[in-house]
Amino acid sequence: MFNWFKKKIPTRESLQDHKILAKLYHLLHYHYLWHFNRHSVSKAIAIGSFFAFIPVPFQMIPAALCALVFRANVGISIATVWISNPITIPPMIYAAYKLGSWMIGHPGFIISLEQPHDIIHLLSQSWPPFLLGCITLSITFSLVNYIIARLFYRLWIIHKWHKNREKHKQANTTKKER
C-alpha cells in the first residue's frame, strides 16, 4: 500500500511545474511532508481523522495546513479526511448529535413541524449538542487512530525484522551446508 502511495506522490519537479502549487512550493518542498515514516504518517492520520469529524466545508484544506504546521505527511492527511464521505456523513452526524445530547443531558427531539418556525427552533436547539459531539468524536478518533497507526507501524517493523532474520538464517545455513 505504501508503494502505491509513493508512486502517486508528486515529485518536486511536478510541484514546481504545477500552476497553483508552484506558488506554494516554498512550503511544500520539505522532505518530511512527503516521507513515509512512523512520525509523519501517524501524525497525518491523526490530523486527517480530526478534521474528518469537524463540520467545515473543504476539510482537506485545514488538514493540509495542519500537516504543514505539524510536519506530517500531507498526502496521508488529506486522504484520511475522506473518512467523511457521502456514505459515512449521515451516521457520523447522527452519532455526533447523540453523543453531544448525552453529554449535555439534552433530551432527544420530538419533531412536529406544524409551523415553519418549528424548523428554525429545531435547528437552533440541535447545534450545541451536535458541535460538542463533533469535537468529542474528532478528538477521540484522532487519538485512537494515532495510537493504532503507531502500533501497526511497530508491528510492521517487527514483522520485517523477523522476515530479514529468517532470510539471513537461511542464507547462513545454506553456506554452512556447502
Image (cartoon, helix red, strand yellow):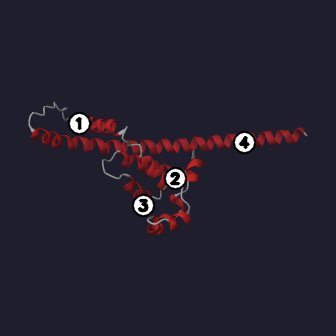
**Residue topped by disc 2:** 39
Earlier in the chain: of badge 2 and badge 3, it is 2
Q: Disc 1 on helix, strand or loop?
A: helix
Instruction: From the viewer's side, name the closer residue of 82 and 27.
Output: 82
x and y percentages locating residue 135 in the rendered image: 31, 45
Earlier in the chain: of badge 4 and badge 2, it is 2
Q: Amino acid at mark 4?
A: Arg
Q: CA distance from mark 2 to mark 3?
A: 14 Å
| Label 4–label 1 contact, CB within 8 A | no
Residue 165, numbered label:
4
**Residue topped by disc 3:** 69
Q: Is residue 96 placed above or below 64 in the rendered structure? A: above
Mark 4 crowd level (few <14, some 14–19, many ≥20, 10 Å Cα):
few
Earlier in the chain: of badge 4 and badge 1, it is 1
Residue found at x 58% / y 53%: 7
Q: CA distance from mark 4 to mark 1?
A: 53 Å
The quarter of the rendered structure image containing the N terminus is: top right
Instruction: From the viewer's side, name the closer residue of 44 and 7.
Output: 7
Q: Amino acid at mark 1?
A: Ser
Earlier in the chain: of badge 1 and badge 3, it is 3
Q: Among all residues in the image, which is located at the extreme right? A: 178
Residue found at x 87% / y 40%: 176
